[in-house]
Image (cartoon, coloured by chain):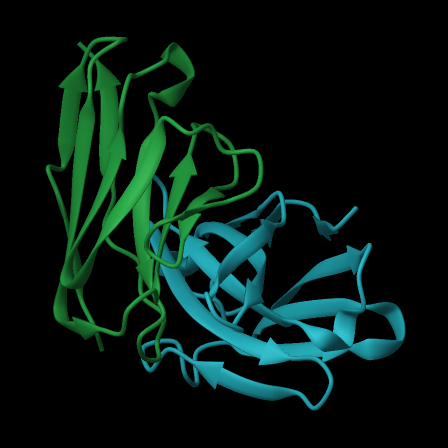
Chain colours: A green, B cyan
Amino acid sequence: EIVLTQSPGTLSLSPGERATLSCRASQRISSGYLAWYQQKSGQAPRVLIYGASSRATGIPDRFSGSGSGTDFTLTISRLEPEDFAVYYCQQYGSLPYTFGQGTKLEIK
Amino acid sequence: EVQLVQSGAEVKKPGESLRISCKVSGYRFTHYWIGWVRQMPGKGLEWMGIIYPDDSDTKYRPSFQGQVSISVDKSISTAYLQWSSLKASDSATYYCARHILDYPPHIDSWGQGTLVTVSS
C-alpha cells in the first residue's frame, strides 16, 4: 500500500502567518489523486482540497494545494484563528486509499 | 442536502458482536461508494474499506479484511459496519463517509462518528 508521510508532525504558528504542510508518498501518485482534509477537535473531518489543487465548495481561497508525483503541499496563506486544527492528506492512486498520519497546526 | 447519520455510541465487552449503522439521505444511495474510517483515541484517520451499494462490490484494506464486515440495506439507504467478536483494540470512533471516485476522487460527506468502547 502507499504510505503517506506528513511533515511536520506539529506546526506552531501565529495568526496571520503562512503555513506550509507537506505530504510525501512512498510511490508516485497519478496526477490529481490526492486530497486534503481538516479536522477540528471533536468533529468529523471535512474536505479542503481535491485533485491535489482544487478547492472544495465553500473553502476560502487562503487554502491552496499543489504538487505531483510523490510530493504534495497544502498552503494556508494567512492563518485565521479557526484554521488551527489537524490536517490529513489522502491518496486515491491505488487501493487502499490511505491517509497520512496528520499535521497538527497549533497556535504559537 | 446530503446527510449521513450514524447510530449512537456503544459500550461492549470483548468477544461480543456489534453492528453500527449509517443512514444516508439527500442523494441516491446506490450511486455513490460509501466507506468507513477508523480513528483510535488521540490518533489519526485509517481508511478501512468501501462498498458500492448498487451491487455490494466491497473493497477492504488488507489489515481489516476478515476483522470487520461492510454491508448495505438498499431498501433503507443504510450502510453497516459489523464485528463478530470485538477486541479491546477495536475501541475507536468510526466514521462513515461518502466517496467520490470519479475524477478527482475524494470524500465529500462524513457522518458524525460513532464511538465504540470495548472493555471488560
Q: Residue at x 24, y 34 (%)?
A: A75
Q: Which one is nearer the viewer's eye here, A98 or B41?
A: A98
Specify whether B102 is left or right of A2. Answer: right
Specify the quadrant of the image occupied by residue B97.
bottom right
Q: Position of residue B55 (x, y in %)?
A: 70, 91
**Vertical placement of B26 versus A102: above or below?**
below
| Quadrant of the drawing holding the N terminus of chain A | bottom left
Q: Residue at x 42, y 36 (%)?
A: A39
* Residue B119 visible from this viewpoint: no
Q: Position of residue A104 (x, y in %)?
A: 24, 31
| Quadrant of the drawing holding the C terminus of chain A | top left
Q: Position of residue A37 (x, y in %)?
A: 40, 44
* Residue B39 visible from this viewpoint: yes
Specify the quadrant of the image occupied by residue A38.
top left
Q: Residue at x 15, y 73 (%)?
A: A28
Q: Which one is nearer the viewer's eye here, A56 or A45?
A: A56
